[in-house]
Amino acid sequence: MSVGFLFTSDISDCETFLYTLKDLARQSGYTYTRGDDWARVNFCRMGELEFSFEPEEDNPEGDLILTAECVTSLAGAGFHAAAIDFTDLVVRETGIQIDMDDETEYYEHRNFQRLRQEHFYPWLTTLVDLCRQEGENSALSNFCVCWDLDQYVPEDIPGTVVTPFGRYHIAQLVDQVQNEGIEVFAREFFIWNEREQNGRFFLNTAMSILWEDCCFMPSDRSERDRTANQTFLSYLERAASMDVSLPMPKAEYELVCRLDGRTPMDLTAFPDYLSDYPIGYRRRPVVHRLGNTDITIPGHFLRDEEDSDIVWYDDAQGGWHSLRASAFRISEGEAEFSERLFQGLPEDPTEFKAGDGRGKAAFAGKLCDDEDDSVYYQSIAQIICARQVTLLTASYEQPEDKGWAMELFLGIRSFRKVEI
C-alpha cells in the first residue's frame, strides 16, 4: 500500500548521465549519493528518487537500462510533485527518452489538488482505517505504521500507533479524522503536503527528527547527537521564521538548545504543540530485534557494529554502560545452553524464561582495561530459542550496576515465530 512512480530509459553513457544528475541535484538543493550500480537523490526526509542500472538481457555490451523508482506516500504530495519536476529537468538536460509509470497520472495532468485529493488523502484515510481495525484487537502489541523495521521499535503503549511523525492514541485519532476530516491530519502527518516547502514542511521535518532521532543528550557526546540536535533546531527555527501561527514544542526546543549550547529563540507568541504522549521515542526504552530475539535498551544508547557483534553504549563520562550482542543459528535441532560459558565465574548463573525461549545469566567479575588500566565489571547471558543462540555481555563501570545488567537480561524476549 503505497503511492509513487517509476520510469525506465536506455542509457548509452552512464558516467555522463550520472555527472549531469549530480550537478542537477546540487543546483536544485537536493542531496546526491552514488554506489556501484545505483544513484540516489534525496529531496527531504523520507523522500528519495533512486536510480539503478543494469545491462540489457539480450545485449550485455550495449546500452544500460535505467530504472528510477520513487515511493512518495510517506513524504506527501508536495514531494511527488517535486520529484516529477526534477524528472522533467533530468529529461530536458540529458536528452533521454523515458517510459513513465505514474499511478497517480500526475505526470500527465499536473493538477496538484487532484493529486492530493484522489491519491494522498485516500491513502492516509486507508491508513487511519487500518489503525482503527488494529485498535480493536485486544492482543495488539507495538503497532507501527510506515516504520523502518531495520531500526529500533519504540516502547509499547497499548491502544497507540507508532509513526515516524509521532505516537497517536488510536481512538482519539479516529475521532479526530471523523470530526475534522482527513485534511487536518494530513497537514500534521505528511512532511511535504503543499506544493512548496512552507513553514509546515520545516516544522514537520523537525518533529520527525525530534520523535525518531534525538536522544536528548548533549551534542558533545557524539557526532550523531550533534547532527540530530542541530538539524532539529535548524528546521524548527526555519519554520518559526516563516509562520508565527505554527504550533511549537517549546519545552523540547529549549531543552535541545541547552544540550547544544545554543541560545533559544523567543517562542512566546507561538501556540503550543500538543501531543498525546511525551515527544521523543528515545527518551524511553526501545526494542532492538536480533533474529528472533527482542532486546530492550535505554533509548539514549548509541549503536555501533563491530565485526559480527552489535554494541549499544551510553558513552557516559562517569558510570558508563554498554551491551554487546551476537547471535547464530544451529543447523538442526533445538539450541542448548553452553555450560562452558559459565564455568569459573564468581557466581552461579540464574536461569529465567525469555518469552518463548530460555535464558541464563551470571555476574562475570571485575576486569582491567589493557589500554588505561581502568577497572570495570561484566555480566554475561545466553538466550536460546528454537535454533537461535544469542550471546550478550553487559559491561559497566560501577559494581552496583550488576543489578542493571540482570534487569536488562530479564527483559529479553525470544519468539519461535517472528512476524516480518
Image: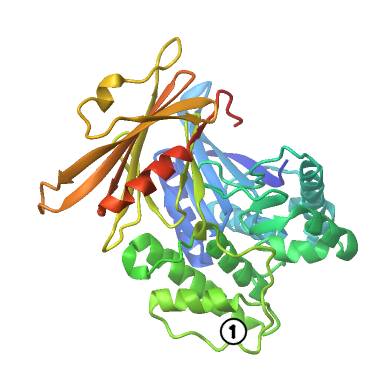
Residue 206 image-quadrant placement:
bottom right
In the shown orientation, is residue 366 left or right of residue 225?
left
Q: Position of residue 301 (x, y in %)?
A: 40, 54
- Locate residue 48, reporting x and y percent: 56, 52
Task: Tell me the kind of residue under disc 1.
Answer: Ser
Report which residue position mark 1 lands on: 241
Residue 345 vs residue 188, the one in the foreground: 345
For numbered disc 1, what is the local secondary structure? helix
Which is more toward the observer, 57 or 404? 404
Q: Please say if 118 is above or below 176.
A: above
Q: From what the image shows, is residue 324 above or below residue 192?
A: above
Mark 1 Cα within 10 Å, few/some/many (few <14, many 20+)?
A: few
Figure quadrant of the C terminus: top right
Q: Quadrant of the N terminus?
A: top right
Q: Quadrant of residue 208?
A: bottom right
- Can residue 115 be seen in the rendering of this structure? no
Q: Is residue 230 above or below residue 65?
A: below
Q: Position of residue 50 (x, y in %)?
A: 54, 46
In the foreground, 27 or 406: 406
Residue 353's x, y, as percent? 49, 29
Give me the residue at 48% from left, 76% from top. Answer: 255
Residue found at x 14% / y 48%: 369
Report the colour scheme: rainbow
Q: Nearer the viewer, residue 166 or 148?
A: 166
Q: Tell me what residue is drawn at x 73 percent, y 52 percent.
A: 107
